[in-house]
Image: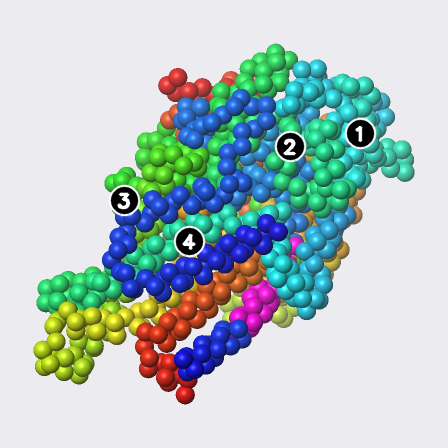
Amino acid sequence: MKGYTKYFLNKLGWFAITFVFAFILNFTLPRLMPGDPVAAIVARQAQGISNPTGVQAIYQQYTELFGTDRPIVEQFFIYVRNVFRGDFGFSFSQYPRTVAEVIGASIGWTLILQFPAIIVGWILGNVLGAMAAYLRGGFDKVLMPAALFLSSFPAFGMAVILLVIFAVYLKWFPTSGGYGYTLIPSLTPTFLWSAFIHYQLPFWSIVLIAIGGQAIGMRSMSIYELNADYVKFARFMGIKDDKIVAYVFRNAMLPQVTGLALALGTMVGGALIAEIVFSYPGLGTTLLNGVMGQDYPLISAATLIITFMVLTANFVLEILYGVIDPRIKAAQSD
Amino acid sequence: MRHRFNLLLILFAIAGMALAACGAPAAPAEQPAATQPPAAQEQPAAAAPTEAPTPAEAAAPVSADALPRKETLYYNGFQWGPVVGWNPYSNSNNNGMAISQGDNARVTMFETPYLYNMLDGKQYPLLADGDWAWNEDRTEITFKLKPAARWSDGTPVTAEDVAYTWATHVKYETATGAANKDYIETVEAVDPQTVVIKAKLDENGRAVNPLIVQAYLSSVYVVQKAWTQKLEERSGGDATKLMADPAEDVVYSGPYGKFFADDTKVVLVRNDNYWGQDPSMWGKLPPPKYLAHVIFKDNAAGTTALMAGEVDVSQQFNSNVQDLWEKYNLPISTYLPDPPYHIGASLPTAFYNLKAHGLDQLCIRKAIAIAVDYPAIIANAMTNQSATFEQVPRSLMNPTPFEQAMYNREAVKHLQWVGNDIEGAKKLLDECGVVDTDGDGWREYNGQKLSYVATCPNGWSDWQAAIEIVAAAGKQIGIDITTNFPEWSVYQTVVTKSDTPLPPGYEIFMMWSAGAGPTQPWGRIRNLLSSEWIGLPSNWSGNWGQYSNPEVDELLKLIPHETDEAKLKEMYTRLVEIYLTDVPSFTLMYRPQNFHTVNESVWTNFPHQGDGTNPPVPPLNLIDGWGIAGLYNITLVEP
């Protein structure tokens, strides 16, 4: 187990170093954007104020409150201290809400939409891709162009097409929102059914695109593996087809797992299109508005979450690789 | 502490997911798509316990989990993000259905003593009883409160509340306090029903600005003293805390209070004990029990919902609005049946950087302004939802009948251009010696080619279309104008910095002007032309091109004190004359105070031009200023 411990510690060290740098960049990059976020808040406050000194007073007040007048290094250390206390501060764009409140209110929607969609897209895509490689013939001839067609669709194109066909023309599904416009959230069958119906189009707009990409990748990997020497050897040995297929897919799956981890990491950004087209609540548009409004604390917190997701997913993946594929551990711990 | 807990929850959720994801391949195919969503959907409701329905105080107990369609009036265009609070002392609650103090204050939840009517320029009593009156020296305004006026907790609205509201605004330096404290000395309660507002006096013993004191009566909410004291207590006298308080427990006097708000919608519920059903005010309750606003992510989504009958009153820009009834035969209409469909109130304006090379020359400014194809701007950028400059000739006034009557149109007729005058512009440039000397097709001034950037914020599509047309006009008259569209966050930082000259790239740029209100048109003209804004490090008022004219400044000082209408008209006419002669900036289109488009599938009898209401109900979506009178007139299509 010594080799594995070394491998694990090595990965953990890199995880920590990457995280620290990512943390610094998450803080710094938004603040390097040109423009002054406090001015935007003052713009809201100053609507209809005809007294110039009044506007200056408001500007001063918010500059001090948000600390944007202090040197950036000082701001950074204040930020670090607060983050360790779990305090991300006030959101500029939704002041006086705190960043925790803003993210807390929208992240649930994003997770519920994106997580199942990515998983379902991934599973369906891989199963279809593997089947295409294995069955070949007519199935492959139909699936391959279809998958290419789907995966090359821009996300907004797919969302708009689904919206126009199924919501505007066929009227099978609602056009927008997370639940019926007449409803108030509650644990009643009416509400849950409404939420389920509203979920379908955004969900499938993500799944369909994911299926295409995954299927293409899985098909190529599987074809490669099916032609590998060990498969031929196993066939000569008279090993059952089921057993061979299991070996093949385990090997073909490795790069696909990497893809899944990365897809989960980019969940927040990926939801943006579906959220905008279907007016679906979620973190994507919250973050976009934060970027537009130079909401530093919100941007930093959201990107920190994304960073954490990507890094953790990769870390767990690498650890699992060590288990799934002994070659990697062996190579890394030398 | 709670924040840390939230964060931990989020991180655990993420870590859990990542782990689950990596474990997933072991058990594929066991998660069919269909079983995922219902289980998953339980979370938003459960995850946001703090945002569960909280029936408003004093309202009848409500347990609805669905809003009955025939008891709900649906809106769009007011709320573009989640509501962050219900605090009438703060301007940053992003609460478009309940809080908007100003020229046409929103009076659904909180109320002002008077209601401004942008159609006739008058103030009508709401909490107040009868008209207000100046004393002889015009230094004090006295008004009475209606004996029937009550808070949502049943206690009477008193003069003490009015006085304490003002004192709080001043003490905590709220935006309202800062805006008015140079003009208002004190607000005092003479007796429980009588309020006296004392104006700040100048060195001559006159009110500094009587207009702004008058405007206070219809633009600032009255907040309950008892609740304010409670708020002060819990914020420990800290101004920032006081204004950041979400005020979920606020006591209000208006007909509606909070019912529900989350990231997807906001709903107000009627207070069935609302004092306004007293014969001294409306004599009845407004028909809709709920006012609801779904938060749409963009205009397109809002328009789709309006077409589907899921929105009754639309305050957003619906492109080509006439298609909704002409092409799709929907029961949708605007205030006016024909173009411009709405009553214009503000004047989106192109400003010149008067310090840029050549733009200090009148003939160049004027040539560009008269060459612009305004009909194209109005047709493309506004899809004809703006009056043309043939219909409403350019001045400093908005198209409301009240303001149009404030100046002598005949006297300035020779100055009012309608645009598209390419030949006239070329002639003007030739005459003042701005010609193409080196034969490259572009004119030079002082040996330097005239080359400008016209700019407005990115994503403001109507403004961008207008700026493109301005640039095209330049090319036709030999002035090289290119366009650039920075993000709003950058744009506003540059444009509002009036203590330095504007940087290159901002030679011609677009900003807004004030709409309709009790200080208008004076306030708008002051914003457009007054030199008092020059030198401010953060100028949100106007005159961003930094124009300076002592005669204008003098007239702007005199107007608030003038009561003789003939003299006022003379002064306003002179200001228009100067504006159209000097061309420091120019109006590109007219924009309504609010867009006001209604779908009469469920509710009907909305305000329309010539609907016979007297005083006329302005098209302000039934919730702003005197516009709220329209809320009491609507009826169900099928009762």
Q: Secondary structure at mark 2?
A: loop
Q: In the image, what residue occupies the spot 34% across and 54% down?
A: A116
Magenta-colored stretch includes residue A118: no
Q: CA distance from mark 2 to mark 3?
A: 43 Å
Marks 2 and 1 belong to one chain: yes
Magenta-colored stretch includes residue A26: yes
Identify the chain of the residue marked 3, using the numbered disc in the image: A
Identify the chain of the residue marked 2, using the numbered disc in the image: B
In front of the other: B392 or B619: B619
Marks 3 and 1 belong to one chain: no
- Three-letter amino acid code of the residue under disc 3: Phe
Residue B93 percent across, percent down from the top left: 61, 42
Q: CA distance from mark 2 to mark 1?
A: 22 Å
Q: Which residue is mark 2?
A: B250
Q: Residues within 10 Å of mark 3 (few under 14, many from 20)?
A: some
Is residue B228 visible in this depiction of the protein? yes
Q: Are marks 2 and 1 in contact (CB under 8 Å)?
A: no
Residue A240 percent across, percent down from the top left: 12, 72
Viewer-nearest of discs 2 and 1: 2
Q: Which mark is residue A328?
A: none
Viewer-nearest of discs 4 and 3: 4
Q: Eyeballing the image, is B455 above or below A44? A: below
